[in-house]
Each structure stands twice: as structure tokens, then as C-alpha cells.
């Protein structure tokens, strides 16, 4: 169970290292994060006839783990 502690929304063009700091070590630098995520966002937007752009809002959520994983938590997605 997670509790969201903050949500920050910025334009894609304004994503900084402060925003990406909690991502995996190899993708923390915005120079890596942006080109890696742009195709992903384009894939999600394509069915709507849209593409990502520098003005697109991006939300970053910070959260606190309230209850750790239990022995009954599936290791693979159920769906």
C-alpha cells in the first residue's frame, strides 16, 4: 500500500534531474530520460492521433511505502 506524498507537474521540456532523480540509476539524467520516455508516450498517445511534444504536461509522483510486499503478493502481473 502506497501513500502519495506529492505530485509535481511540469512541461516535458522542463523536466530536470530533480524530477528524474528517483528513476533507475541509468535513466536519471534528463538527457537519457527524455529520449527514452518520448517513444513510450508516443505509443500511448498514438491511438488518439496524438504525439508527445515539449508542452505536454508530465506528472511526477512521490510516495511512501506504507506496507511492504507480503508473501502473498504475486511476482508477475495478474492481468
Image (cartoon, rainbow, N blue to C red):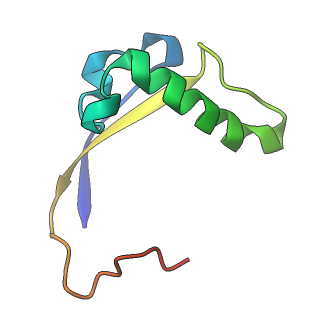
Q: Quadrant of the C terminus?
A: bottom right
The part of the image, by quadrant, that contains residue 29 is top left
> Can you say whether 16 is above or below 44 in the image?
above
Q: What residue lies at 59% left-to-right and 13% top-to-bottom? A: 54
Q: What residue lies at 29% left-to-right and 39% top-to-bottom? A: 24
Residue 1, image x, y percentages: 25, 67
Q: What residue lies at 34% left-to-right and 77% top-to-bottom? A: 75
Viewer-nearest residue: 30 or 15: 30
Residue 31, image x, y percentages: 41, 15
The part of the image, by quadrant, that contains residue 65 is bottom left
Q: What residue lies at 30% left-to-right and 27% top-to-bottom? A: 28
Total tally of numbered discs in the picture: 0
Residue farthest to the bottom, as pictured: 72
> Can you say whether 53 is above or below 21 in the image?
above
> Can you say whether 14 is above or below 73 in the image?
above
Viewer-nearest residue: 25 or 64: 25
Side (left or right) of 36 relative to 73:
right
Residue farthest to the front, as pictured: 26
Viewer-nearest residue: 63 or 27: 27
Side (left or right) of 42 relative to 54:
right
Side (left or right) of 46 relative to 70:
right
Residue 6, image x, y percentages: 26, 37
Amino acid at each position: 500500500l502506497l501513500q502519495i506524498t506529492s505530485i509535481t507537474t511540469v512541461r516535458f521540456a522542463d523536466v530536470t534531474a530533480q524530477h528524474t532523480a528517483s528513476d533507475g540509476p541509468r535513466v536519471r539524467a534528463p538527457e537519457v530520460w527524455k529520449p527514452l520516455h518520448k517513444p513510450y508516450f508516443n505509443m500511448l498517445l498514438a491511438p488518439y492521433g496524438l504525439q508527445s511534444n515539449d508542452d505536454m504536461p508530465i506528472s511526477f509522483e512521490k510516495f511512501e511505502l506504507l506496507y511492504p510486499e507480503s508473501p502473498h503478493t504475486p511476482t508477475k502481473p495478474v492481468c
